[in-house]
Image (tube, rainbow, N blue to C red):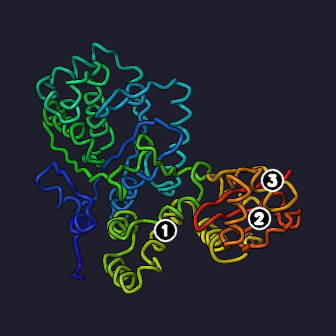
């Protein structure tokens, strides 16, 4: 593959959707640009949807540009308008807690090399009338109504607070342009209206030119965003989404999406990515592309040791002897499956009583049909007695059929 410019590589990776500024490509290719990406602290952790933007910011940093990462202590008090309904207002204490958690995550991802800011720092002393005079008079209401996110809410209704959000974010850009030399904003495509508002303020008030581009929103194979509002959040906090859970999710990435994800989520070169896809297509069942994706993301987020641990747990659960795992590893891997209390006794009686089988008849049929395993060991003896020798500490992994797992707990 021929050598690409920085901008050409961003386009090849599918990271450019909307663009503001005619010579933005020249700046990305030939200058060191200070840019910013921001998020509101709506939870105490970012998720994989945020990471798709953060890794683009990190990619720009590796190209020689200077990132500013903003956590919205001011904008988070209002909430960015959603397409369907107003965001729930969270308490100030919760907001501040979330900010600290998110700042630590961002600092880790960027190896302490990015500037971290909170927009409440420049809004906390800003008088409301001064803000209207300094900022509000430069943005026409008709201009705001024409923005897609506002326009979509007009029929169902939008509060004045939400309506004002784009002015606040627009001022963020103006303020950082003036005080930090920030000339570009980079966000997901749902932020296009807010980006252009900031660019317009810089042009109208300071008579200067600023730039911006948006990235397409990353969707799963069902067409849903990677976000907590979609009910499929993969948190960057390892205590909320373990490396094993993240590994399993990425390992099961649909073949139709894996090339896109390798382009977006990894620092592999275009040649390396296409070589992996070429090998993957020879034997898709080996899931080389998915395994590479998981390795890159987990290593970047949590380190190589966590990636190797996720692989070890996965291989032990599906291929090897579960007794090689610690009880902590087992709990981590199976925290989302049904937990059942078990006791010593005949396997049919114990597992029926635990609710794993609907009846003793079903238990007998499945056990005798080789459809049950304890710690990956097939059990087809109807007279088998479950004892403490079957547990790891006090846990036992029970598998019914091909995919249904239970975590048995013996007290």
Mark 1 element type: helix
Residue that carries the numbered disc 1 in the rendered image: 251
First in sequence: mark 3 vs mark 1: 1
Residue that carries the numbered disc 2 in the rendered image: 326
Say which quarter of the image contains residue 280: bottom left
Say which quarter of the image contains residue 55: bottom left
Between 332 and 407, the one lying in front of the other is 407
Q: Nearer the viewer, mark 3 or mark 1?
A: 3
Q: Residues within 10 Å of mark 1 (few under 14, many from 20)?
A: some
Above or below 210: residue 329: below
Residue that carries the numbered disc 3 in the rendered image: 342
The residue located at (35%, 79%) in the rendering is 277
Above or below 307: residue 148: above
First in sequence: mark 2 vs mark 3: 2
Between 259 and 361, the one lying in front of the other is 361
Seen as rendered, the residue at the extreme top is 129
The residue located at (11%, 25%) in the rendering is 142
Mark 3 element type: strand
The residue located at (42%, 54%) in the rendering is 51
Instruction: Give coordinates of residue 198: x percent, y percent.
Output: 22, 36
| Alpha-carbon span between mark 2 and mark 3 | 19 Å
Q: Residues within 10 Å of mark 2 (few under 14, many from 20)?
A: some
| Alpha-carbon span between mark 3 and mark 1 | 31 Å
Between 122 and 1, the one lying in front of the other is 1
């Amino acid at each position: 593959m021929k050598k690409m410019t920085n901008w050409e590589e961003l386009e090849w990776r599918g990271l450019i959707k909307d663009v503001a500024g005619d010579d933005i490509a020249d700046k990305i290719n030939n200058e060191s640009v200070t840019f910013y990406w921001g998020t509101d602290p709506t939870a105490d952790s970012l998720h994989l949807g945020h990471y798709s933007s953060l890794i683009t910011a990190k990619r720009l940093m590796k190209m020689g540009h200077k990132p500013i990462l903003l956590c919205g202590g001011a904008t988070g008090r209002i909430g960015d308008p959603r397409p369907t309904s107003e965001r729930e207002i969270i308490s100030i204490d919760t907001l501040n807690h979330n900010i600290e958690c998110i700042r630590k995550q961002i600092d880790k991802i960027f190896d302490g090399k990015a500037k971290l800011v909170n927009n409440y720092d420049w809004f906390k002393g800003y008088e409301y009338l001064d803000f209207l005079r300094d900022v509000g008079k430069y943005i026409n209401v008709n201009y705001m109504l024409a923005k897609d996110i506002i326009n979509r809410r007009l029929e169902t209704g939008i509060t004045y607070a939400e309506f004002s959000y784009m002015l606040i974010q627009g001022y963020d850009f103006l303020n950082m342009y003036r005080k930090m030399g920030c000339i570009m904003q980079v966000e997901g495509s749902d932020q296009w209206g807010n980006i252009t508002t900031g660019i317009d303020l810089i042009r109208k008030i300071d008579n200067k030119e600023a730039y911006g581009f948006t990235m397409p929103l990353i969707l799963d194979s069902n067409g849903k965003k990677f976000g907590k509002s979609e009910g499929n959040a993969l948190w960057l906090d390892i205590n909320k989404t373990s490396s094993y859970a993240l590994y399993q999710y990425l390992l099961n990435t649909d073949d139709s999406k894996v090339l896109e994800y390798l382009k977006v989520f990894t620092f592999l070169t275009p040649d390396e990515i296409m070589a992996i896809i070429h090998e993957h297509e020879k034997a898709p069942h080996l899931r080389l592309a998915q395994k590479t994706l998981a390795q890159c993301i987990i290593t970047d987020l949590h380190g190589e040791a966590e990636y190797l641990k996720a692989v070890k747990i996965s291989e032990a659960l599906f291929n090897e002897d579960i007794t090689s795992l610690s009880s902590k590893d087992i709990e981590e891997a199976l925290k989302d499956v049904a937990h059942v209390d078990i006791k010593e006794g005949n396997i049919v009686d114990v597992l029926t009583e635990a609710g794993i089988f609907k009846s003793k008849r079903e238990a007998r049929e499945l056990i005798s049909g080789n459809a049950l395993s304890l710690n990956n060991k097939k059990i087809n003896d109807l007279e088998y007695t479950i004892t403490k020798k079957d547990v790891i500490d006090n846990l036992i992994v029970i598998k019914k059929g091909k995919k249904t797992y239970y975590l048995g707990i013996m007290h």
